[in-house]
Image (cartoon, coloured by chain):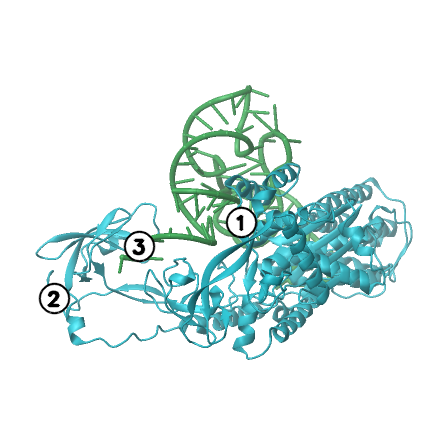
Chain colours: A cyan, B green
Amino acid sequence: MRYLVTSALPYANGRLHVGHVAGAYLPADIYVRYLKMKTEDVIYICGTDEHGTPISISADKENTTPASIVQRYHKSIKAAFDKIGIEFDNFSGTAREGHYRISQEFFTNLYDKGHIVPKDTTQLYCEHDQRFLPDRYVEGICPRCKQEGARGDQCDACGATYDATTLIEPKCKICGTTPVIRSTRHWFLKLDDFTGKLTEWISSKTYWKENVRNFMLNLLEQGLVERSITRDLSWGVPVPLPEAEGKVLYVWFDAPIGYISSTIEWAEKIGQPDRWKDYWLDPNTQMIHFIGKDNIVFHSIIWPAMLMGQDKKYCLPHDIPANEFLNLEGQKVSSSKDWAVWVDEFAETFPAEYLRYYLAVNAPETKDMDFSFRDFQARINNELNNVLGNLINRVLSFAAKNFASRVEACPLSEESKALVEEVMRTAHECEESYSQFGVKASCKKIMDLARSGNRYFDERKPWTAFKTDPLHAQETLFTCLCLISKISVLFSPVLPKTMAELRALLGVESKVTWNEVHNVIDQAFVINEVKPIFRKILDEEIDQELERLQTKAAPAKAKNYKALKELISYDEFSRMDIRIARILSAQKVPKTDKLLHLVIDLGFEERELVAGIAEHYAPEAIVGKKVVVLANLEPRKIRGIVSQGMILAAEDENGLSILLPEKDSGPGSTVQ
RNA sequence: CGCGAGGUGGAGCAGUCGGUAGCUCGUCGGGCUCAUAACCCGAAGGUCGAAGGUUCGAGUCCUUCCCUCGCUACCA
């Protein structure tokens, strides 16, 4: 059996954060290291995803070329991987010539088979820049909430999604002029052509993770729609059709092809240019894509469909172990708000393998997990340091002090044999969990083994036995050393560097193969050196990290004052009828998060209205309050309730604050 | 409302094929002194979101409902 392992291509427009690592890279790296220890034929392929609109925008903003943006982040991402020991056989990028060629071949094959068809659509075109504007290149007034600064396809203020051509007063983000609507032609992938094949294929994948399988089956059932796979952009893989000048392939179309082009690049580098075919065209190869859950659709539907539509008989993914997300201190990670732990920064502060351990043991395998600095500290200190680190340290120092660093092999009692058997059992269990991507389970088993070692050591009391029965103590030490050396094998996929250091201390061969766990050790241990391999993380260090996180994120939250609106005349102002009203009753509108259904007393009449304040005010807390209401706003039906007016409230990043009259003005009083 | 994922002792989690409910941390009590104030033993603490059902037996299967999170919608 041969293995081809990939991780989702990181997008070359930002740094790498711990969420990325936990989901797509560390589990893959551990899996690959395990396979390599088993001397399996495996390569680990990745690279940066280097096309698409955000990169073009970054380039324009910095007045540079997309290529230079890509180069910068490619370097930074690769450096971060190096720091935490994510080792690829090849780390390429999609803006390379070989990649263009294959991507175009993919398109052409699908096109020739009739799976790709052209369609005309309308889109905004900037006459000044002479280019069509993708959604992210346009800004304007939201057609629904009339808020300024709405994006081309979506309004951040009200959340509406719409077609960019419906935007009011659209402006080109590059030059600021007003674009015009023009017709443009795009090419669509007819995914539905593959529904039957895909369904059949997924049916055989009973061993897939539930989240992936369910998601995919669901989509297939709902029916697949045609997807546009081209864009009007200059940065990307040109569409290989004479009539498609100025168009490039959509980044999502060419990105997964990067797995192939990176493999080809690898084959060329090792001087065997045809080797890539072993991994892509031979059905004896298992292809495994590690991804985050955001990538499931592309890897389980679109990508297999693309592969199915090729002339070459490509292997389909054997498994797609998608992981869930890692939150940070209870909140979603957000790169733009700087609410993230960056890998390169983190590795400056703490030993990189602490991060590997924490992310492994806290892997978001079945549900979203939380990265918390306090939890990180606790797990490193209590588990790695106290349980494993201390076991190693107490055994090694005892051996150094009382056995002059040399512990001979000796016959084992039943008690010791039991421990050795437990080691063997754990080895088998780890084998099973590693091969099923169960990183968490492996770590737990190994730590349990270390705990057993501590218990064994305690029960046998070598410090006492040594005085009366040195052989008894020797047996204890020898057994513990065996256990530790086996742990150094079992833990190698997760903590390669630290385990190598440990093996150096133990005086055993530094190169590890998995077979070693099954060997019976009959030779003496000669200890090289005694020193702690882990250290505790201090409270101060954690305080510092937390503070840094808060201050980094804070300014991002505080900024963003909304732009001042245009001047209006007094006359326009006076058309608004603002009144004081008393809230008579309030209840939540069912099935909504933010809406309260209110009955208010305006003095001269009672009215119903709906207010979006439920997240900030409990119904019982505002009944009886006197509030400020815009009373002549045209009624609008929301969730079946006719809302006759609007409660005035102030809003900032901390939430909403209802305006209240400072003195006891009666209901119906006018406000100006 | 739609889709997806979850709801297990104070906290964070594991529970594969249905068979007396586990782990780590925390708390309380004890032991040890080889070791990085580390380690070991013991105890308290859960009607496994709720209700029905299948079964000799369900955290584990089925049905309905409730709650939380993500995407989505609502947010005059």
Asked if residue A309 can be seen in this view, the reply is: yes
On the image, the x and y values in percent for residue A606 come to 13, 52
Furthest toward the bottom, the residue is A63
Residue on which the image places disc 3 = A614
Residues tagged by mark 3 and mark 1 found on one chain of the structure:
yes
Task: Tell me the crowding category of disc 1: few under 14, some 14 to 19, or many 20 or more residues within 10 angstroms, Cα based.
Answer: some
Quick one: SS at disc 3?
Answer: loop
Residue A179 picture quarter: bottom left
Badge 2 amino acid: Thr
Q: Chain of mark 1?
A: A
Give A232 or A379, whichever is nearer the viewer.
Answer: A232
Residue on which the image places disc 1 = A226
Between marks 3 and 2 in the image, the one whose residue lies nearer the viewer: 2
Between marks 1 and 2 in the image, the one whose residue lies nearer the viewer: 1
**Up/down of A460 relative to A74, above or below:** above
Furthest toward the front, the residue is A243
Quick check: A459 left or right of A528?
left
Q: Chain of mark 3?
A: A
Quick one: SS at disc 1?
Answer: loop
Residue A556 picture quarter: bottom left
Task: Tell me the crowding category of disc 2: few under 14, some 14 to 19, or many 20 or more residues within 10 angstroms, Cα based.
Answer: some
Badge 1 amino acid: Glu
Of marks 3 and 2, which one's residue comes earlier in the chain? 3
